């Protein structure tokens, strides 16, 4: 049972990293893949904490930080779309 959950966690994490590396043109897709990576890390954290019978209070702190990271990324995305009109990385002159 635990081995299956760890295998699911690693496959979710690797798929998230793969999508993050392949879809580097759009900022929105990169943010979505980062949120998927955070979700897989939360799943792995839950599996490890329940397997070792630790308290799961840290998971609430982790969720709070990941929500703050997501809202910050979304606000940056909205700011860039309003300034430049799209979310393509190649069209930003600031990054080059």
Image (spheres, rainbow, N blue to C red):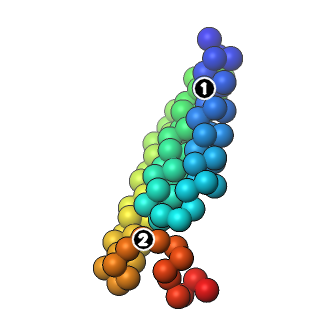
- Tell me: residue 90, above or below residue 55: below
- Which residue is pictured at 53% across the width and 88% down the height? 93
Q: Which residue is mark 2?
A: 87
- Tell me: residue 89, above or below residue 32: below
Q: Earlier in the sequence, mark 1 or mark 2?
A: 1
Percent across and percent down for residue 26 are: 48, 64
Q: Secondary structure at mark 2?
A: loop
Q: Which residue is mark 1?
A: 8
For the residue pair 52 and 44, the one nearer the viewer reads as: 44
Percent across and percent down for residue 51 are: 63, 20
Crowd rating for badge 1 (residues with CA inside 10 Å; few <14, some 14–19, many 20+): some
Q: What distance separates the C-alpha of mark 1 from that of mark 2? A: 31 Å
Q: Considering the image in quadrants, where does the N terminus appear?
A: top right
* Residue 62 showing in the rendered view: no
* Quarter residue 77 falls in: bottom left
* Quarter residue 87 falls in: bottom left
Q: Secondary structure at mark 1?
A: helix
Q: Residue furthest left?
A: 82
Percent across and percent down for residue 78 are: 34, 72
């Amino acid at each position: 049972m635990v081995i299956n959950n760890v295998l699911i966690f690693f496959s979710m994490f690797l798929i998230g990293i793969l999508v993050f590396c392949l879809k580097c043109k759009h900022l929105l897709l990169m943010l979505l893949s980062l949120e998927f990576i955070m979700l897989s890390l939360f799943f792995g954290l839950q599996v490890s904490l329940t397997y070792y019978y630790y308290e799961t209070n840290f998971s609430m702190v982790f969720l709070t930080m990941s929500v703050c990271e997501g809202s910050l990324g979304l606000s940056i995305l909205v700011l860039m779309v309003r300034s430049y009109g799209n979310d393509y990385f190649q069209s930003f002159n600031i990054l080059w």
